Image: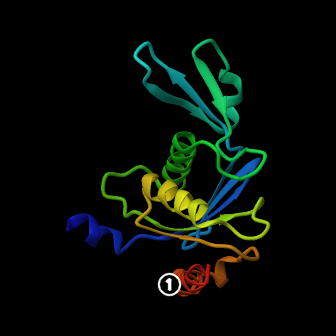
């Protein structure tokens, strides 16, 4: 109950995803987080996975027990690695909004910027929604359309518009 009350005071984040770039914009402040979508993941002896670096720093981490992956790179679709994608988005949200205990969870307007010819499938939409929820979003809309400017973003209006489009699939 306390978490829901805190989230009412959250911000909206516009997340744009390209195969080679992740850009997060806090609509209220205009603050931007932009990185290459790379994640360095280390595996331990028991099969556990730990993210050790993200973005440009991840490229330098290649080693015996470290794999560097781009969760938004696949020949057919934009999204290929759920674990790495979630951790990357979580890191970006923390860097953009701060890492406080009582930070309101943002509403995320997630905009896949490429590999959307013919529209996204319901499976892709669900995967992107769950990615953002797992990364700490309070609500998510997967947006398909032209690039939006900060003054064009009204989360609730876009949510209604996208829900209508999804109903027609």
Q: Quadrant of the C terminus?
A: bottom right
The extreme front residue here reads 169
Q: Is residue 130 left or right of residue 23?
A: left
Q: Foreground: 25 or 77?
A: 77
In the rendered image, the vertical position of residue 46 relative to residue 147, given as above or below: above
Residue 162 lies, in percent from the top left, at 59, 81
Residue 2 lies, in percent from the top left, at 21, 66
Q: How many labels sit on residues?
A: 1
For residue 33, which quarter of the picture? bottom right
- Dot 1 crowding, Cα within 10 Å, few <14, some 14–19, many 20+: few
The extreme left residue here reads 1
Residue 61 lies, in percent from the top left, at 65, 22
Q: Foreground: 105 or 140?
A: 140
Q: Residue shown at 50%/84% (left/top)?
A: 156
According to the image, label 1 marks what residue?
156
Q: Residue shown at 58%/72% (left/top)?
A: 27
Q: Is residue 146 left or right of residue 125?
A: right
């Amino acid at each position: 109950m306390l978490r829901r009350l805190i989230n009412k005071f959250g911000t909206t984040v516009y997340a744009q995803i390209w195969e080679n770039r992740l850009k997060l914009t806090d609509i209220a402040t205009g603050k931007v987080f932009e990185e290459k979508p790379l994640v360095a993941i280390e595996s331990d002896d028991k099969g556990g996975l730990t993210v050790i670096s993200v973005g440009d720093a991840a490229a330098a981490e290649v080693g015996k027990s470290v794999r560097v992956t781009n969760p938004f790179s696949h020949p057919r679709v934009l999204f290929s690695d759920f674990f790495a994608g979630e951790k990357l988005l979580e890191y970006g949200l923390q860097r953009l909004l701060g890492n406080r205990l009582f930070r309101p969870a943002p509403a995320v307007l997630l905009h896949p910027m490429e590999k959307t010819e013919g529209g996204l499938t319901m499976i892709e939409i669900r995967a992107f929604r769950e990615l953002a929820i797992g990364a700490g979003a309070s609500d998510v809309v997967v947006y398909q359309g032209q690039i939006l400017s900060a003054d064009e973003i009204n989360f609730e209006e876009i949510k209604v518009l996208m829900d209508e489009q999804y109903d027609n699939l």
